[in-house]
Image (cartoon, rainbow, N blue to C red):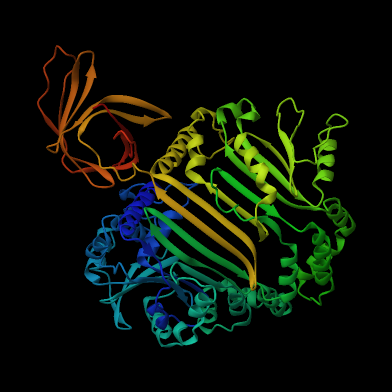
Amino acid sequence: MTLISRLASTAVLATLLSATGFQALLADTNPHLADIPADSLFHYQTRLDDLVATQSLMGDIRQQTFLSTMQDLAAEDIPLFVRLQAEVERLFADGPDTVESTLGLDPQGWLTAYHAGLVAVIRVDLTSDTQLLSWLSEQGLPVATNAVQETAGGRLYPLNNDPAVPIHSHLWVSADTARFMMSPGEMTGAQIAERLEESLQAPSFADSGRVDDLISRHSLTGSDFWWFDYAGLTRAVLAADNPSLTQDLKRFVPEYRTAMDDPDMALCRAELIDFAEVTPEILWGMSDLTVQDGQLQLDRFGVLTLSDAQVLQELAALEGRLPVDLDQPGDSLLRMGLTLNVNQLGDTLLAWRNRAINADWTCPPLVELQSDLADINMAAVLAGSAMAQGAEGLILELFDMDLQAAEEEDWTSFDGLLAIRAENPQRLAMILAEALELPPGFQVPDSGDSATLPLPDAPMQVRISGDYLVVYHGEQARNRALVLGSVEHRNALFAGSMDLPGFVRHLEDLPMDSYPQPATGGMDMAGNCDALMNLTDMANHLEHLDIGGWLGMAPDGLALTQTLQVQPSASAGMPIQPGRYQLSYFEECSWFDIGEDYLGTDGQAEYAEIEGNCSVFEERFEWSADNRALIWGPREARERNSCQDDFSPWEVLEAEPVRCEVVRREPDGSFQCISQDDYSTRYRYRRLN
């Protein structure tokens, strides 16, 4: 399934929810917590409906594909649960009831991931196990004939026990629960069953309250929440204080036993654990999810906890000040701000270095680190810090750009600014003039008026706005420069935002053959073109997708907040209309016209390839469409060599329906789709009437 279809699915979900408005409230306690051992060091949980919405938004845009075709779902090299997630997202676009009727999953249920020893577990809620087992059989997994072991009130199916594969997978299923489990290949089914039964009898997260406490403490919804106990993992590996995990490491990982017998390990064990305790855990979760008036907003929060109060205080002292609106792109394509209290930087680096050098370490790698730190010329570091004294932040904002002009090194094609915040911006202007070797006497007015930088290739403007020295070009950048110094600020280390579809639409102006090609290996020109097409597909589906966030200090560590605002384009949900279309296909960075396609109102379609004044190839078929695809029904065709020849008899070309997944829609009814067959061809239907 492509990212575009995932975004489209989310758009459909957003449209459904926005009819009455939707807001993710604090979720009820996850009932799965009662069955998760309290010594699990990794935990993920989400409501299934939230998973569909958030994962559709957070797909890897750089690679652009999650699963390119439904045929890929049967590929053996794609993990089973990834295939299942793709199917869930596809079915949710048809409505939550379809997920239940096709897969037997509870659309309002929970999904939870954790571990029991070396067995990784993904648990989902079921309304019936029959549909799930049937779907697994369709994926080529003969669960109906596999050996079954009754354990823990359910049935354990081996899904993959090939000795050549290092990771084996099993399915435990009951009437209302499924657990997908992955384990080292050396573990037998009996040992996996034993580990599962032990985990169900051990003290649980529900008993300890740890997960609920983290969720409550950070005001999270409890959905799309993950947590990793780094310090606990270190203790489990080095100090054997996690019985189930340590036992499995000793039994199934020979390298672990060898490492634990290393003499250096006795010297390092306690000191490495102390290191891990400085950053004991990391968590990330949803703080809000709302859909209103067709717009979806997702807020997230994460923190890398720090246990050392002195380090927390020192990092907080390094925070600077940034404009409060940097996390919202507004009219810009891109905003970024980085700030650091340089006046504190030198003293902080020196303090950290001295504490490390004076630590009483005996672990050889740490002793070597001490030696390396002692060799650093701190005088040079402090001198460099002193040179930057007074500089407090850097801001980059881009409002518009012409990439074709930029290729000709016309830098006036950009509407944007670069701003430096300083205690004395006038002094900074003098340093800039010296660095650029500007004519003697060049000066930036104190009055707030602008001056022109006399640079032949880049005639920029420069002005002082409050505490900022701003270099800019363009009308929108000028308007921003006028008010930048008066905008409200807040403490942070970094902030940024991006109008992703807006940024991508500018890429369409760049000729495809201008994209740089890798010197060796990597993506060829056709691959670059496909990647660009996928990006512009995404821009076509969305009116906007604004991404913004802040990085700064929280009371318990280094915190990241993120906001996504998504609104589908007006054409995103348009149905495919009957009519006549010019049909083209995309190959090697070019479109090729191949004929005309008529989609009739009666569900019948006609296609013809024209040469001169007549058709030499004709095809007729049934057609239909859902909210994601054009569906070609059974097809038959006839052809001739020239207009003077007779047509051949009608011949059946394709008996089974073929889906063409719609990836782009235009306001006039034109659209593009990718065939879900062996060829995965991109077609363009340009509306003629």
User: In the rendered image, is residue 142 in sight?
Assistant: no
Residue at the front extreme?
447
Residue lying at 84% horizontally and 40% vertically, measured from the top left: 430
Q: How far from the left and from the top, in percent, is residue 570?
A: 35, 43
Give the quarter of the figure containing the C terminus.
Answer: top left
From the viewer's perspective, is residue 617 above or below residue 266? Answer: above
Residue at the left extreme?
649
Please indicate whether residue 487 sits to the left or right of residue 434 in the image. left
Q: How far from the left and from the top, in percent, is residue 132?
A: 26, 66
Camera-side residue of 646 and 251: 646
Residue lying at 79% horizontally and 46% vertically, measured from the top left: 425
User: In the rendered image, is residue 462 in sight?
Assistant: yes
Residue at the right extreme?
379
Total marks placed: 0
Q: How far from the left and from the top, in percent, is residue 263?
A: 72, 77
From the viewer's perspective, is residue 473 above or below residue 67? Answer: above
Q: Quadrant of residue 383?
A: bottom right
